[in-house]
Image (cartoon, helix red, strand yellow):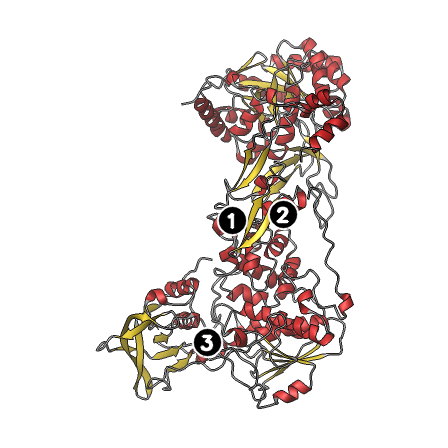
Amino acid sequence: MTADLSVDFCGIKSPNPFWLASAPPANSAYQVMRAFEAGWGGAVWKTIGEPIVNVSSRYSAVDLEHRRVMGLNNIELISDRSIEENLREIREVKRHFPGHVVIASLMVESKREVWHDIVRRAEDAGADGHELNFGCPHGMSERGMGSAVGQVPEYTCQITEWAVEAATRPVIIKLTPNITDIRFPGRAAKRGGAHAVSLINTINSITGIDLDTFVPRPIVGDGSTHGGYCGPAVKPIALNMVSQIAGDPEIGLPISGIGGISTWRDALEFMLLGSTTVQVCTAVMHRGFRIVEDMIQGLSDWMESKGFTACTDFIGKSVPHVRDWGKLDLNYRIVARIDQAKCVDCGLCYIACEDGCHQSITKERANGRNVYTVVDDLCVGCNMCSLVCPSPGCISMVQVDEGKPFETWEMRIARTGSSAAAWAESMGKH
Amino acid sequence: MAVKPGAAYSPEAGFPEIHPAFSDAEAKIESGRCLYCYDAPCVRACPTHIDIPKFIGRIHTGDVMGAARAILDANILGGTCARVCPVEELCEGACVEVALQRRPIPISALQRYAVDHVMHRRMRLFAPGAPTGKRVAIVGAGPAGLSCAFELRRAGHAVTIFDARELPGGVNTYTIAPYKHSVDFCLEEVEIVRQMGVEFRQGVLVGRDVTFEEIRSGSDAVFLGLGLGHTRKMGIPGEDLPGVWEALAYLEASRTAPPDKQPRAKVVAVVGGGNTAIDCATTAARLGAEMVMIIYRRGRADVPAFPYEQEIARMDEVLFVCNTLPVEVIAQNGRASALRCVRTQPGPPGPDGKSAFEVMPGSDRILGADQIIMALGQQPWEAVPGLENLKTTRGGLIEVDPVTHETSMPGVFCGGDAINGGGEVVDAVEHGKIAARGIHCRLFGLDAARLGLPGDNGSPRQTWHSVRRPSDIRPPAPAVAPAHH
């Protein structure tokens, strides 16, 4: 049994929030129909445009100990098949799966009539909406497309306008993370009339170098090029950018969250930060379409355990909890507690604190083992020891109630008159 | 590491090793599991203080040579120790993974992987120090002597080892269970020491071929790596019959004899319950014995061999015949053919605290065996002429200064089984290191306590090898209080 996972994303009805991202898994009717059969609610087609030629090889990855492909890097370009072929296949998918979502990802040269033409042809093929690829960071950007558009808010706004002019269905702008502040292209998309944004596209990256040939990966003969980074490693960056868009009062657009989503938990985090749908690529490339079964079940089970009956019950629930630093409570204080019964004597908390943090853990030899103890007065509650401890439940961070009222840095400055005075008062507490 | 039933000896392959070497893939995966503990329990459990997280981390990053360097810097016999250390009692037993209810990091297998890497490639990782003009004589080419010689050469002292046997290596070469490591491997390890410029004089028995006084007067210092003395005897009739083996002679034969001279037998009785008894029993099983018994005078739970060793015997289907005391070796056609034994039962605790046993009257029985191996332990070291006046402990062991390992005779140092009554190879290696530092410090008038041993983070950071004047000793780093103190 599953809960009702259906969502309405800027007017597009989707049976669930799980979509394939515009990427190799959504390259053909064959793949997208296999995905829909597995349970995916929608797919953003691999970007359609003037066909390109790809190189070999194309991918490289970063592993973390036994976990392979924590990060994936690609130098593939948009679809290498013709626009006609792609549109014909979109039509076929929609004929077989009318209740599922197919979004046409589009990238063409920066001319008004060319954008009008491609938008109309995509709608004619039955696409439920358009995702404008302003994010591809490699190859296409050298030709003035992809992130070359997404990195200049004026271009983003302009091309969004052109697409919206011709569109009768929603236009989603896919944002590149290769900028300093994601809110500027987000606002540009809003100004251009976009109905939604999706983010993040891939991050410029070089994943590693062959230490024998000196050629970075992925290796193309005697050279390589920077690629686009994705997979679990980018999730924290993506979550932050999603929260920035969600929290920006000037934007206020529905969000399709992208970036390292592999499980229902990942998806849920993006939704809590304001994403209505989520898009997945790397995890599917790693393990196949079948993973969506566990994402659906996991999200449904979680909703049931929390008593939620619809995704709207929780989408965006974490947005108000993301604040500027100056709005955090300076008087909230926690300290580390080490449960000696669970300590395995690895010394990692000690050395992390001693060399990297605040020298707040003591080490004493007793009965042939080391005993590590937190000095409460010195502990600043940074969490580091609990992050490195390998023993579950051994180090907990506990709140110390010092009886002080809620006060933020902004409040303290307002009360003391200057940041120097606020600092002096803060330091005086030790 | 899980024990599997022993693979049989074959004339072509000899004794197959009990644990196969790690593949590159296994080493990569297993090294990735190490948590890189600080002041790690595994290191504290290693008598030679090998920096285990460091060498495992180096394996994981692909610097296998660097891993071997970290190991051999602290323990030049790291290859042997990787094969023969009772790691369940030492590093692997202390691994935090055990406390986390997980499989310990296979430290010994990883250590072997790294050391094999450099040994197979004949890499030379260490160079002798600049000559000091000092000469040190070492008596005994066993683990303690080899370790001491290597350390002294790093510092630039001239070293000559006098050893009574044909081959160097001592217990490593002659009396380790043959399926744990081979004579060839041991001699390769000796080669590392020889290549440092150590002179080996094999077949020279001090007291017979050369006097101790000659050795002492021809050198600036002497290190004694004498090992233990004769094996104990039971003192029962028939003990000297053909077919009765002394444990170490039996192990030596299994290690060194050609296939047609291997000490094979059909029914083997090993008398004793220590680790050496297990070595003999499992070796006999691998040599194709139809039945192997361990005959032990106390109860099954009292068998003193390490649990891991007992597990090897169990997998080799060795029968433990406990509460049984041999009283006579029975002969047939002039050869041992059986043991007459009596049953025992626990008695009141003796003065040593161990539960004593008493013989049950009328409990005689005969256990047939065509080979009887006496594994009863060894006497302490044997006095060589010239060493009669060495100060000894009440147990008859040579007494040494704990920091320098100098004996009561000035300029004469000692380590290994002669001072601990029979320890592990790894203990002897550490003794050799300590004594080498002690010798060096005596020769140059240095305070040994102020200079560190390789690998030992608990000792001063500055190691001793290149220090020749007290003024070379760096003062400790200035103590700077943390910002908040």
Can you identify the residue that label 1 sits on? A344
Residue nearest the viewer, comparing B442 with B125: B442
Q: CA gap, disc 2 to disc 1? A: 14 Å
- Identified by mark 3, the residue type is Leu
SS for dot 2: helix
Judging from the image, mark 3 belongs to the subunit labelled B
Residue nearest the viewer, comparing A78 with A333: A333
Q: Nearer the viewer, mark 1 or mark 3?
A: 1
Q: Is residue A62 left or right of residue B380?
A: right
Q: CA gap, disc 1 to disc 3? A: 40 Å
Q: Is residue B47 visible?
A: yes
- Identified by mark 2, the residue type is Ile
Q: Is residue A227 left or right of residue B257?
A: right
Q: Are marks 2 and 1 in contact (CB under 8 Å)?
A: no
Residue nearest the viewer, comparing A270 with A424: A424
Q: Which mark is residue A326?
A: none
Identified at 54% across, 44% down, the residue is A390
Can you identify the residue that label 3 sits on? B251
Residue A242's x, y, as percent? 63, 23
Residue B415's x, y, as percent? 58, 74
Judging from the image, mark 1 belongs to the subunit labelled A
SS for dot 3: helix
Q: CA gap, disc 3 to disc 2? A: 47 Å
- Identified by mark 1, the residue type is Val
Q: Looking at the rendering, which quadrant does residue A74 occupy? A: top right
Residue B176's x, y, as percent? 49, 72
Earlier-in-chain disc, 2 versus 1:
1
Q: Which mark is residue A351?
A: 2
